[in-house]
Image: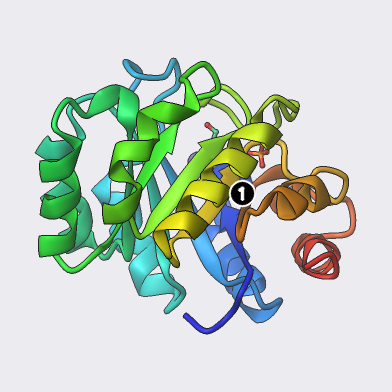
Amino acid sequence: MANKYVISSSILSADFTRLGQQIAAAESAGVDWLHVDVMDGHFVPNITMGPFIIEACRRATKLPLDVHLMIEKPERYIEAFAKAGASGLTVHVETCPDMFSTLKQIKSLGCKAGVVLNPATPVGEVFPFLAEADLVLVMSVNPGYSGQSFMPESISKVADIRKKLDSLGSSAWLEVDGGINTETLPKMKEAGATAFVAATAVFKHPQGIEAGIKSLRSLL
Ligand code: DX5
Ligand code: ZN
């Protein structure tokens, strides 16, 4: 992808009675990726979407589908999500005892491979995998729900990972997720993030989806 910075709009805050229309509105407003939050009710308290929704999104748009797997034993479902049309699959360090083989599995199915860590997880836990990752995601809320407040402790994690990626010469995306809005995005950008996930700030923007995307993009 040619852009230096991307906005990935999370459909978790979309109106699911009009999902196709909302995706089309985000696409025509110039969003770069669609972020799909998969939750299993075990790794996180909430239950959301499975491959079926990814397959529906795939038919609704040509945008890259940035799929965030908040599930235990994600390796069991990677093939199903890849077949459903995911462009990238991001798995948590907390759920992958053999991260190298999980990242390899994702890539072997033609998807970009991402690694993500929770707010409580020390940043060093992802360092061993940076050279293999196409994307590194830093959670700036505890995963489970949209609409939560940004955790400022995550800013220094982004800065630490940025340093490591640069020292490796890696061009992996450094993505941030949770409480991203016009106030927090510039702080994460300054720390070195390049991909910004937003659910509430896009799909619940008081002036609509287009205004939400444009206000974030104006800061990039
Ligand atoms: C949280 C999800 C996020 C969420 C972000 O568990 O991973 O992607 O949708 O929502 P906002 O942008 O409202 O914080
Ligand atoms: Zn997410």
What amino acid is found at the position of numbered circle 1 in the picture? Asp
Using the image as rendered, state which of residue 58 and residue 142 is in the foreground. Answer: 142
Label count reads 1
Residue furthest bottom as drawn:
2
Q: Which residue appears at 52% of the width and 16% of the height?
A: 120
Give how far across and how far down residue 177 sits, in percent. 59, 42
Residue furthest front as drawn:
167
Mark 1 within 8 Å of ligand 1, using the beta carbon: no
Give how far across and how far down residue 107 sits, in percent. 17, 61
Crowding near the residue tagged with mark 1, few <14, some 14–19, many ≥20 C-alpha atoms within 10 Å: some
Q: Which residue appears at 43% of the width and 62% of the height?
A: 172
Using the image as rendered, state which of residue 159 and residue 176 is in the foreground. Answer: 159
Residue 188 visible from this viewpoint = yes
Q: Which residue appears at 57% of the width and 27% of the height?
A: 145
Residue 16 visible from this viewpoint = no
- In this rendering, is residue 155 above or below 85? above
Which image quadrant is residue 77 in? top left
| Quadrant of the drawing holding the C terminus | bottom right
Q: Secondary structure at mark 1?
A: loop
Q: Which residue appears at 47% of the width and 56% of the height?
A: 167
Decide if residue 114 is on the left or right side of residue 211: left
Using the image as rendered, state which of residue 97 and residue 129 is in the foreground. Answer: 129
Which image quadrant is residue 215 in? bottom right
Q: Which residue is mark 1?
A: 15
- In this rendering, is residue 75 above or below 15? above
Give how far across and how far down residue 126 sits, in percent. 37, 35
Decide if residue 102 is on the left or right side of residue 212: left
Decide if residue 46 is on the left or right side of residue 204: left
Using the image as rendered, state which of residue 110 and residue 24 is in the foreground. Answer: 110
Give how far across and how far down residue 205 sits, in percent. 82, 51
Q: How is the image coloured?
A: rainbow
